[in-house]
Amino acid sequence: MPCGVVVEPGVFRLETRELPVGAPDGWVLVDIEAVGICGTDYHIFEGKHPFLEYPRVIGHELSGRIALSSQDWSAGELVVINPYFSCGECRACRKGKPNCCSNIEVLGVHRDGGLCSRIAVPAQNLYRATGLSEIQAAMVEFLAIGAHAVRRAGSVRGERVLVTGAGPIGLGVALFARLEGAEVHLLDLSEARLAQAKEKFGFEDVHLAGSDLLSGPLSDGFDVVFDATGNVRAIEAGFPLLAHGSRYVLVSVVKEQISFEDPEFHKRETQIIGSRNATRQDFETVMKAIKDGSVDTDALCSRKIPFANFQDTFGELANDRETLIKAVVTL
């Protein structure tokens, strides 16, 4: 079967590997239908991912169809794949937090991913995608990241929320914060991204980085700030924007140390909250929102690319992501 492999930084090609025909007990064979391409895949291609060994089959935003009927599954059923493989035994798993399992393995990062014809997946990581298209089902995972971050923040209804970073993850956060009844503001370095957030998704309160957010009606800051930039300077710049009694949700991950002024942090009684991956609850929240039309997946899907053409397109996508929200590879 053909597989999309990043052989080494800057080198991507289609390779032929053996098609899986059997799976261990408790695992299910899935024929892949569509694969969303995300920032992690670009970082792998660029050699910027810290937890990865090459070569690697990429792809973790996945939809597929059950390959073989079993007691619980019918051949041909459309499924969303949760790409976070948890051990089920560590302290986090025992507390119902498999998304931050101590021994987590993520498809396309710690183990080969789903940019291929077929993979084997633990049955517990499959969710029926009834009512979704193959493309929509492949977009659930990245939106679940945003839904999880909003849930981590607690109730945001009626609160003033700032999402820093208007890329795909930031847009997901903003969409689900708005669905929860928050007053959502977006901050980004890119005028084009902000214009897109306004025109495609109706976010009126958009702010270009460098503008004075703490003036006029916003002078007392934001109840919740979500960082989706992956930039340490942007994260540190978010601390002064926090209102008293606020929460700071760090969705993106940086390698560097983050510093802040402790007196300012303490007088605000701010909470710093990490948000990692997503759980079944978040996947289900996203699927419901897509089905009822609360989330416009057509607006989110920037490009659909046949698998056979992706080798010639991947480098182009990696170099031009300013207004690219989601590219989906179809198999």
Image (spheres, rainbow, N blue to C red):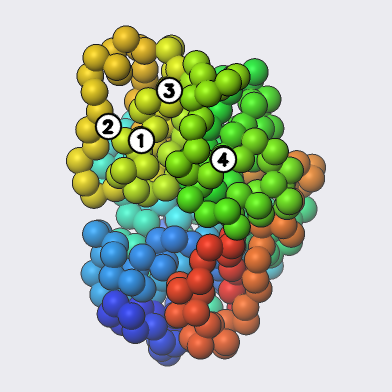
Task: Tell me, yes or no, if residue 95 can be seen here.
Answer: no
Dot 2 amino acid type:
Arg
- Badges 1 and 2: C-beta atoms under 8 Å apart? no
Give neighbour class at mark 1: few <14, some 14-19, many 20+ (Cα, 10 Å).
few
Dot 1 amino acid type:
Ala
Give neighbour class at mark 2: few <14, some 14-19, many 20+ (Cα, 10 Å).
few
In the image shown, does 187 or 279 lie closer to the viewer? 187
- Badges 4 and 3: C-beta atoms under 8 Å apart? no
State the CA–CA distance, disc 4 to disc 3: 16 Å
Q: Residue 298 in the image: x percent, y percent? A: 74, 59
On residue 207, which mark appears?
4
Residue appearing at x 25%, y 28% in the figure: 260
1 or 2: tag closer to the N-terminus: 2
4 or 3: tag closer to the N-terminus: 4
1 or 4: tag closer to the N-terminus: 4
Query: Mark 2, mark 3: which one is toward the viewer?
Result: 3
Residue behind mark 2: 91
User: Label 2's element?
Assistant: helix
Query: Mark 1, mark 2: which one is toward the viewer?
Result: 1
Task: Tell me, yes or no, if residue 260 can be seen here.
Answer: yes
Q: Residue 65 in the image: x percent, y percent? A: 63, 66
Give neighbour class at mark 3: few <14, some 14-19, many 20+ (Cα, 10 Å).
many
Q: Residue 111 in the image: x percent, y percent? A: 33, 65
